Image (cartoon, rainbow, N blue to C red):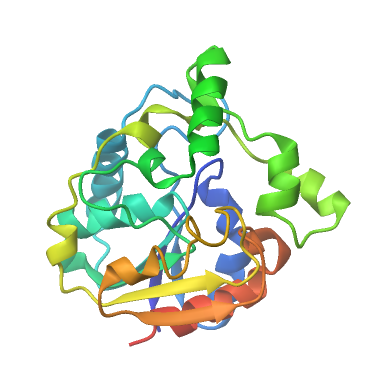
Amino acid sequence: MTHFVLIHGAWHTGEHWAPVAKRLEQLGHKVTAPTVLGHGKGVNKNVTHAQQIDDLVAQISKADLKDFALVGHSYGGTIISRLAEEIPDRIRRLVFWNAFVPLPGNSLDDETPPHYRALFKQLSDASADRTVTMPFPIWREAFVNDADEALAKSSYETLSSEPYQPLIDKLDLKRFYETKIPKSYLNCTEDIALPPGEWGWHPRMSSRLGLYRLVQMPGSHEVIFTNPVGLADKLVEAGRD
């Protein structure tokens, strides 16, 4: 039995893990899926990356969670990298699922293609609360490209706006790159949320982990919606000892 702590990506909340958590629990595992500060509808979006980390450390410490596999999806890769610095003794393994592994001193924004950087800034500047709302065409074509139209629309309706500041906060990460915590990278082979090639997920991000386990599965950036059972099964493979 493995205890999975699941950290969602941008525009998501912990609730999006529910179908994955159900499958993991059916397989005998334990699941905790917190919502990262500033995510969800009707919440305060004026947060920093450091505040998100402090809040999660407090949640994990209060619940006294130990010996768990810490999974980060997409933006969640920046979160689990920082948590590995703050609470390394509590983590059994890090699992990056098509997740950012920023270079030391970089922000998530630094790791994205120029057209995304420009778009996120434009959307944030135009918003009333300095957030980025996912444009549906990008969601449909680049994020959930393995869904039919109905699922693309219904999943899009559950998303929330993303706080902009944490996307541009610089992350030191020197301690992360020195950590000896075992690592895995789960790569969905049809994931084009980052354009394949120069800006792609694998091997660009995965190779930064040093020694790591590679697990792959078919699907888009959002198999959390399109194939949650398959995703859960691959997380077990990625998270095992």
Residue at left offset 67%, top offset 69%: 219
* Residue 185 lies in quadrant: bottom left
* Residue 165 lies in quadrant: top left
Residue 9 in the image, given as x and y percentages of width and height: 49, 49
Farthest-out residue, bottom: 241
Residue at left offset 15%, top offset 67%: 179
Q: Nearer the viewer, residue 166 or 119?
A: 119
Counting every numbered tag in the picture gives 0
Q: Nearer the viewer, residue 224 or 123?
A: 123
Position of residue 105 relative to residue 18, above or below, is above
Residue at left offset 55%, top offset 45%: 12
Residue at left offset 85%, top offset 57%: 148
Position of residue 128 relative to residue 33, above or below, is above
Quadrant of the snapshot with the N terminus: bottom left
Q: Nearer the viewer, residue 159 or 60?
A: 159
Q: Does residue 171 appear in this view?
A: yes
* Residue 55 lies in quadrant: top left
Q: Is residue 223 left or right of residue 12?
A: right
Q: Is residue 123 left or right of residue 33?
A: right
